[in-house]
DNA sequence: GGCGGAGCAGATAACGGTAACATGATTGCG
DNA sequence: CGCAATCATGTTACCGTTATCTGCTCCGCC
């Protein structure tokens, strides 16, 4: 089996010699390109298989000046939102010969620059990256690279090339409408303290602005550090209600802490949605299994992934203004009272 | 900014001309290799920066016969377990110049073959892949590739090269001990119906075997299709208890459905852990925020990722027998009664 | 029966870097 | 002060594949 443990790696030449045709012909067979007789094709394929030849895309990419990779740059893998986006991307890329390669930035702009630089050095066919806020250096790199760039998740801003996402301002505003219409007035907000999470920031801005238009101000806000978890949601909920016991609504900046808050409130016997209403953001699958359905906004993650992939794959044309805005849609749930 | 939109991409030659030194010297500067005077170094870096040059790793990799990539092949991104493993891997790879590239197989052996083939065609420096069960073709490919291969998660079997993981048979057996010691006797099992999830299978085998040693047989079992979610856990729990109402324990094959089952049982007013005990598997963070702490087994995901990364990075030597077995550790929780 | 075009295969020259060796200028030191 | 070691740079030959061009054969058709 591994008689050849120390041998040098196989090349086209090996297959070529084993099958008695030129390297060029082997290359053609292996890529299904150009005309090759059925007989030689068979010979070559057999030889390649028995040798266990695996093509070298490094060499191939250099020669053809084409690399079938799509760089995907996202802030995090751990918050249940980006895996969905990735799912949409790979589903749509599946039949294109393109392959996504993922880089993670941990919400750090400097890491984003580094990851981008690294990705671009592989000369991918396209780039998908989260958010519209990027360093000057990053924008320059992408500008210079001369390839399709799709910024995802957010459309409130100026895309480098194309953007696919939802308006987080709008998502915030629409949730505000919903809450106000239900009659809640003493509203608290719980979110992560991350200056780099621009989408959360915009959501809150849109939310507060709409509240303001109706003469309502946020009655309390609470920020936390680090990742979002059920436990964190519980802690923050307890804290904000200890500080402002007469709040009648809590708007959470994501579903995970929202779910934690919901569980805590239920345990403490709060009348939900009567005495206290709750809402989250994202529309994660987790919510389906909670004792009570948390009201939230569907961030259209899978659709965003799909559309972004279609754009880089050239399956879909870039719109005139470079923006594809999907509609964030409120998923009612049972944590806002009927009105 | 993009006056050069249509220009051909930059190469070393451009930087070389802009800075008045040879391409070789530019290459040396950009890689910090070999001796270069401070003056030229500065000149070159400035030129590279103002041009916006990004090195071409395709060409570099071909020339140097070295590629700083580590292929990571896993079955899924969506079940909260592999993101943790990835976290461990990238943490440990961070200071090595190596970069992980992830491929997802969706638990399909044929997709695993395809993903591996694809990854190997990039000539990575190492491969990390989940599980010990692989097609003959896959084993041959990896054997032939002549690079470090680390199989992760599982150690019950024969590694191709090196394995890092826990014994799932042991994990199952130890949980059985725990359950029996607490006096439960009418035990049900809920798991996914996936012939390709070998680790779940081994866990169950170890579990049943240990029960058998104590003269106990599984009183019921229930399998489901598709992904694991809280909701699925609820449904399956309801179903198994409808069928076998006098079960006194439920062993779930993962925490997500375990948590769903727990929530359902609490709503229905079951006395837990008195009348009914519950246990899951994995030790996911989610459990921290539930109304009651689910007993589970820590699968050592982050450690596994770290050790695997250390092995491919050469920070750690391959052990004699090729197996690094970490101890699965039971995390007590409140869903098994004290004994 | 000559000629255009399709079918098939090979020869050659890139692709953009880096390894390895070569070269000229300094430096150290007995 | 002379010679070897070191430093700083350049030259040359690939790395393994694909684009492109060339050449030959065979076929159909006017």
Image (cartoon, coloured by chain):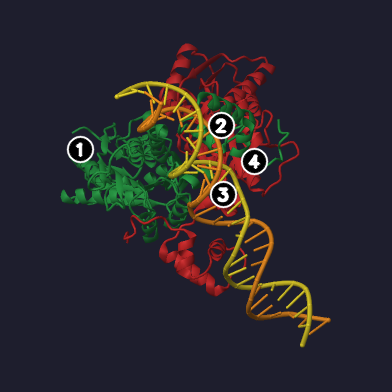
Chain colours: A green, B red, C orange, D yellow
Q: How far is mark 1 from mark 2, CA to CA?
A: 41 Å
Residue B296's tag is 2
Decide which of D16, D11 is in the foreground and name it.
Answer: D11
Q: Is residue B30 above or below residue A321?
A: below
Say left or right for A53 vs A126.
Answer: right
- Mark 4 vs mark 2: in front: 4
Q: How far is mark 4 from mark 1, CA to CA?
A: 69 Å
**Which chain does the residue under circle 3 lie in?**
B
**Which chain does the residue under circle 4 lie in?**
A
Q: Position of residue A204 (x, y in %)?
A: 28, 49
Q: Both on one chain, marks 2 and 3?
A: yes
Say left or right for D5 vs D12.
Answer: right
Decide which of B221, A116 is in the foreground and name it.
Answer: A116
Residue A9's tag is 4
Q: Is residue B179 above or below residue A118?
A: above
Decide which of A71, A43 is in the foreground and name it.
Answer: A43
Q: How far is mark 3 from mark 4, CA to CA?
A: 13 Å
Residue neighbourhood size for the residue with mark 4, other residues' Cα within 10 Å, grouped as few (<14), some (14–19), many (≥20): some
Evaluate whether residue B299 shows in this view. Answer: no
Evaluate whether residue A247 shows in this view. Answer: yes
Which residue lies under the disc numbered 3? Answer: B62
* Quadrant containing the C terminus of chain B in the rendered view: top right
Q: How far is mark 2 from mark 3, CA to CA?
A: 48 Å
Q: Position of residue B110 (x, y in %)?
A: 53, 26
Residue neighbourhood size for the residue with mark 1, other residues' Cα within 10 Å, grouped as few (<14), some (14–19), many (≥20): some
Q: Is residue B55 above or below residue C26?
A: above
Q: How far is mark 3 from mark 1, CA to CA?
A: 64 Å
Which residue lies under the disc numbered 1? Answer: A182
**Which chain does the residue under circle 1 lie in?**
A
Residue neighbourhood size for the residue with mark 2, other residues' Cα within 10 Å, grouped as few (<14), some (14–19), many (≥20): many
């Amino acid at each position: 089996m591994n008689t050849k443990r120390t041998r040098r790696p196989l090349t086209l030449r090996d297959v070529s010699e084993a099958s008695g045709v030129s390297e060029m012909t082997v290359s053609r067979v292996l890529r299904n390109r150009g005309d090759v007789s059925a007989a030689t094709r068979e010979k070559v394929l057999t030889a390649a298989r028995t040798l266990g030849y695996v093509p070298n895309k490094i060499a191939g990419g250099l020669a053809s000046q084409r690399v079938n990779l799509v760089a995907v740059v996202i802030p995090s893998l751990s918050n249940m939102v980006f895996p969905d986006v990735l799912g949409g991307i790979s589903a749509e890329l599946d039949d294109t010969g393109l392959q996504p390669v993922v880089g993670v930035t941990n919400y750090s702009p400097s890491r984003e620059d580094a990851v981008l630089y690294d990705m671009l050095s592989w000369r991918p066919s396209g780039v998908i990256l989260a958010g519209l806020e990027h360093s000057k250096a990053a924008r320059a790199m992408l500008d210079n690279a001369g390839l399709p760039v799709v910024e995802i998740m957010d459309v409130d801003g100026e895309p480098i090339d194309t953007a696919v996402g939802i308006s987080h301002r709008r998502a915030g505003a629409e949730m505000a409408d919903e809450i106000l219409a239900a009659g809640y007035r003493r509203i608290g907000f719980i979110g992560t303290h991350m200056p780099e999470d621009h989408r959360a920031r915009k959501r809150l801005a849109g939310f507060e602005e709409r509240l303001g238009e109706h003469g309502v101000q946020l009655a309390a806000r609470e920020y936390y550090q680090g990742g979002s978890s059920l436990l964190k949601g519980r802690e923050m909920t307890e804290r904000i209600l200890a500080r402002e016991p007469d709040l009648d609504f809590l708007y959470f900046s994501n579903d995970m802490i929202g779910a934690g808050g919901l569980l805590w409130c239920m345990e403490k016997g709060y009348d939900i949605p009567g005495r206290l209403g709750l809402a989250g953001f994202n529309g994660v699958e987790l919510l389906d299994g909670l004792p009570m359905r948390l009201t939230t906004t569907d961030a259209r993650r899978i659709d965003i992934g799909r559309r972004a992939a279609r754009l880089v794959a050239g399956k879909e044309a870039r719109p005139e203004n470079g923006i594809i805005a999907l509609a964030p849609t409120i998923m009612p749930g049972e944590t806002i009272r009927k009105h």
